[in-house]
Image (spheres, rainbow, N blue to C red):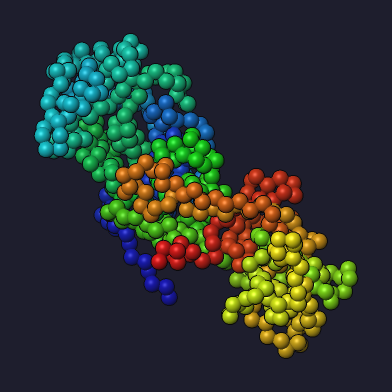
C-alpha cells in the first residue's frame, strides 16, 4: 500500500479549520490580473488553489483583478481561461473585481464617514517622501486633517471626473508611524481616465490592489486567500480593511513563489521580450508561459506533476528547470508515439536489394504502451541515415556504420558497409552497403551480432519536415540575481532550425496525437506553423539531460 503523503502547511491549516468548525466548506480563488499571459509560476498557483479545494471537497472561484484599465485586455482574459481549462481545472464561479466597483466605492465612502479615509492633494513623489523609511516614521499629510464632509465632497468629485489624473488620491487613515510601511496611510483610489474592458467609461477612479483584493475575497466568502510571499507585509492591511468594514473574515496565507533557472517570471519582462521581438510572441516555445509550454509540447499532466514535486514552501528558493524537463520526459516516455526522423541525411544504397522491392516493416508505436499498437515502416533499397552515424575510418568502439562493420536498421535488417561515393570536395555523398536477407527483426536466423542499431527513412517514401530545436532562453542559471540588463543574458543559440530533415511517412497520417519521440533525438511536438504537407516540429526536450553533462 502506498504511503500517505504528508500534508503541506496550507493543507494543515485547512484541515485544522475544518476540524475546529471555523469553516464548514473550503472556498479558494485564483485572482490573475488580465495584463499578460499566464506563466509556469501561475500554473503552480492554479494547481495549489484548485488542488487544495478539491482535496477538501471545496470550490475555487476565478476572479480577474481588473482594476488597472491601462494594461488589461479581453485577449488576456480569454487566454487565462483557456490555460486553466487546458491544465485540467474548472472554476465554480467567474468574477471580476470590476463586478464590485459600486460596492467598493460604497465601502470607501463608509470609511470616509468613519474618519478612516481622506482625499490627498499631494503628488506621488510627495506622498513617497511623507512615508518615511523602514527605520524612520512617516509624517502626516496636511490633507489628513480634512473634515468628513470635505472628503466626501472631494471623493464624489473625483468620481465625477472633475480632477486631473495624479492631482488627487484617496488614502486610508491608518498609522504613519507603523513599522510596516504598507500601513502608512496607503492609497485606496487613484484617478485614471482610461477605457475599461468591461465597464467602459463609467469610472475614472479605480481601486488599488490592496483595497480591492481583500474586500473582493470577503464579498465572495473566500475562506483561504492564498498569495505569494511578497504579499506577507500586506496582510495586516488586508485584515484592517475587512475589520473596519465588518466583512466576512477572509484570511490571507502566503507561500513561496516559483523561481525557475534559466528564465524570468516577471510579466513586465516577458512583455518586453515580446514587444522587442526577442521572441516571436507570448506562445514562443522558449517562453515560460503556459501557452509557450503547450506549443513546445508540454502536457497538462507534466505541469501538474511538476507542481506536485516542487511542493509548497514558506521561503523563496530557485527550482532547477531540469525538474520540469524530468516531468515531461516521464509523461512523454509513456504516451508519445515513436517515429523515425533523420535530421542530417546521408544516403545509403543497398546494392544487393531486389530492384523495386519495398518491405513494410511492423514497428511498435510505443514499447511502454502496448495499447498504442504498431505501424508499418517502408524499407527499400535506398535509405537515409544520419551523417554522424557513418564514419569511413572510425575509432575503436564506434558501433555505428562503417566500412566492413555490421549494424541493424531499427526493426528491419542488418546491413554492412562496403564502399562510399564522394563529391569533388571529398565529402561522402553515398554509402554502399549489402544487407543480410535472413536478418529481418523478429525472424533473424543469420547468427550475426550487430552491436549498433540505427534509425532510418526510406528515400522514396521520405517526408520533408522542418525541425526547431529549442534550448534555454537565457545563458545563466539565476537571471534574477544578475546586475546586468536581463536582455544581454539571452542565449543566442536558444533556437536552431533544421530545414532538410526527412521523416517516415506515418507522420503525414497521424491524426490522434501531436507529440512524438523522434527515435534517438528527443521529444517533439507538431507546431501550428505546419501547412498541408509541410510539417514543422518543435523540440520539447532532449532524451536525456544534456545540460547536466555540459555544466560539469
Q: Quadrant of the C terminus?
A: bottom left
The image quadrant where one finds the N terminus is bottom left
In the image, what residue occupies the spot 82% across and 70% down? 381
Question: On screen, 480 above or below 342?
Answer: above
Q: Nearer the viewer, residue 448 or 27?
A: 448
Vertical comparison of 486 with 465: above or below: above
Identity of the residue furthest to the right in this view:
355
Q: Is residue 19 visible?
A: no
Q: Quadrant of residue 109?
A: top left
Left/right of residue 483 with respect to residue 31 in the rendered view: left
Residue 138: x percent and y percent? 13, 29
The extreme bottom residue here reads 447
Query: x and y percent of residue 548 in the render?
Result: 43, 65
Which residue sits furthest front?
Answer: 424
The residue at 42%/73% (across/down) is 2
Which of the two residues, 205 or 358, is positioned nearer the viewer here?
A: 358
For image coordinates 31% across by 49% down, the residue present is: 481
- Of 78 and 317, which appears nearest the observer? 317
Q: Position of residue 192 (x, y in %)?
A: 37, 20
What is the total number of numbered labels drawn onto the structure image? 0
In the picture shown, does residue 253 fall above or below 157?
below
Q: In this view of the protein, can residue 541 be seen by the observer?
A: yes
Task: Examine the image and state in which quarter residue 320 appears.
Answer: bottom left
**Residue at the spot x=39%, y=43% of the render?**
486
Residue 145 location (% of width, % of height): 13, 18
Amino acid at each position: 500500500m502506498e504511503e500517505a503523503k504528508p500534508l503541506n502547511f496550507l493543507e494543515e491549516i485547512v484541515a485544522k479549520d475544518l476540524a475546529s468548525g471555523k469553516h464548514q466548506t473550503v472556498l479558494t480563488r485564483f485572482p490573475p490580473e488580465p495584463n499578460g499571459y499566464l506563466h509556469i509560476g501561475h500554473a503552480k498557483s492554479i494547481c495549489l488553489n484548485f488542488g487544495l479545494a478539491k482535496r477538501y471537497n471545496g470550490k475555487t472561484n476565478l476572479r480577474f483583478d481588473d482594476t488597472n484599465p491601462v494594461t488589461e485586455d479581453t485577449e488576456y482574459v480569454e487566454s487565462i481561461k483557456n490555460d486553466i481549462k487546458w491544465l485540467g481545472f474548472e472554476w465554480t464561479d467567474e468574477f471580476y473585481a470590476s463586478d464590485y466597483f459600486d460596492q467598493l466605492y460604497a465601502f470607501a465612502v463608509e470609511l470616509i464617514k468613519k474618519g478612516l479615509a481622506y482625499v490627498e492633494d499631494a503628488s506621488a513623489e510627495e506622498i513617497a517622501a511623507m512615508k518615511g523609511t523602514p527605520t524612520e516614521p512617516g509624517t502626516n499629510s496636511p490633507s489628513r486633517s480634512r473634515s468628513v464632509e470635505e472628503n466626501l465632497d472631494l471623493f464624489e468629485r473625483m468620481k465625477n471626473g472633475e480632477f486631473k489624473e495624479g492631482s488627487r488620491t484617496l488614502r486610508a487613515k491608518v498609522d504613519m508611524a507603523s513599522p510596516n510601511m504598507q500601513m502608512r496611510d496607503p492609497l485606496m483610489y487613484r484617478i485614471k481616465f482610461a477605457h475599461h474592458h468591461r465597464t467602459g467609461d463609467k469610472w475614472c477612479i479605480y481601486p488599488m490592489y490592496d483595497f480591492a483584493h481583500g474586500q473582493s475575497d470577503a464579498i465572495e466568502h473566500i475562506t483561504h486567500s492564498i498569495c505569494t510571499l511578497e504579499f506577507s507585509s500586506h496582510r495586516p492591511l488586508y485584515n484592517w480593511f475587512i475589520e473596519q468594514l465588518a466583512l466576512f473574515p477572509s484570511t490571507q496565507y502566503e507561500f513561496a513563489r516559483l523561481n525557475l533557472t534559466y528564465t524570468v517570471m516577471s510579466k513586465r519582462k516577458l512583455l518586453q521580450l515580446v514587444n522587442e521581438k526577442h521572441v516571436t510572441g507570448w506562445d514562443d516555445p522558449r517562453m515560460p508561459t503556459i501557452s509557450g509550454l503547450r506549443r513546445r509540447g508540454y502536457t497538462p499532466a507534466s505541469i501538474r506533476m511538476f507542481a506536485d514535486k516542487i511542493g509548497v514552501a514558506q521561503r523563496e528558493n530557485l527550482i532547477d528547470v531540469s525538474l520540469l524537463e524530468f516531468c515531461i520526459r516521464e509523461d512523454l516516455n509513456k504516451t508519445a508515439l515513436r517515429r523515425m526522423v533523420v535530421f542530417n541525411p546521408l544516403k545509403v544504397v543497398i546494392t544487393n536489394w531486389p530492384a523495386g522491392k519495398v518491405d513494410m516493416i511492423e514497428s511498435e508505436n510505443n514499447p511502454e504502451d502496448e495499447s498504442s499498437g504498431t505501424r508499418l515502416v517502408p524499407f527499400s533499397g535506398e535509405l537515409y541515415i544520419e551523417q554522424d552515424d557513418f564514419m569511413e575510418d572510425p575509432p575503436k568502439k564506434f558501433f555505428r556504420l562503417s566500412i566492413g562493420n555490421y549494424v541493424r536498421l531499427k526493426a528491419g535488417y542488418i546491413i554492412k558497409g562496403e564502399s562510399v561515393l564522394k563529391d569533388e570536395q571529398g565529402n561522402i555523398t553515398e554509402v554502399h552497403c549489402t544487407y543480410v536477407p535472413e536478418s529481418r527483426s523478429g525472424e533473424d536466423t543469420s547468427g550475426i551480432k550487430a552491436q549498433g542499431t540505427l534509425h532510418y527513412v526510406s528515400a522514396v517514401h521520405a517526408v520533408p519536415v522542418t525541425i526547431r530545436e529549442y534550448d534555454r532562453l537565457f545563458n545563466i542559471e539565476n537571471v534574477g540575481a544578475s546586475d546586468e540588463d536581463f536582455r544581454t543574458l539571452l542565449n543566442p543559440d536558444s533556437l536552431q532550425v533544421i530545414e532538410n530533415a526527412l521523416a517516415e511517412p506515418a507522420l503525414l497520417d497521424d491524426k490522434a496525437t501531436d507529440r512524438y519521440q523522434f527515435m534517438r533525438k528527443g521529444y517533439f511536438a507538431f507546431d501550428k506553423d505546419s501547412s498541408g504537407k509541410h510539417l514543422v516540429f518543435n523540440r520539447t526536450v532532449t532524451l536525456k539531460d544534456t545540460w547536466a553533462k555540459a555544466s560539469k
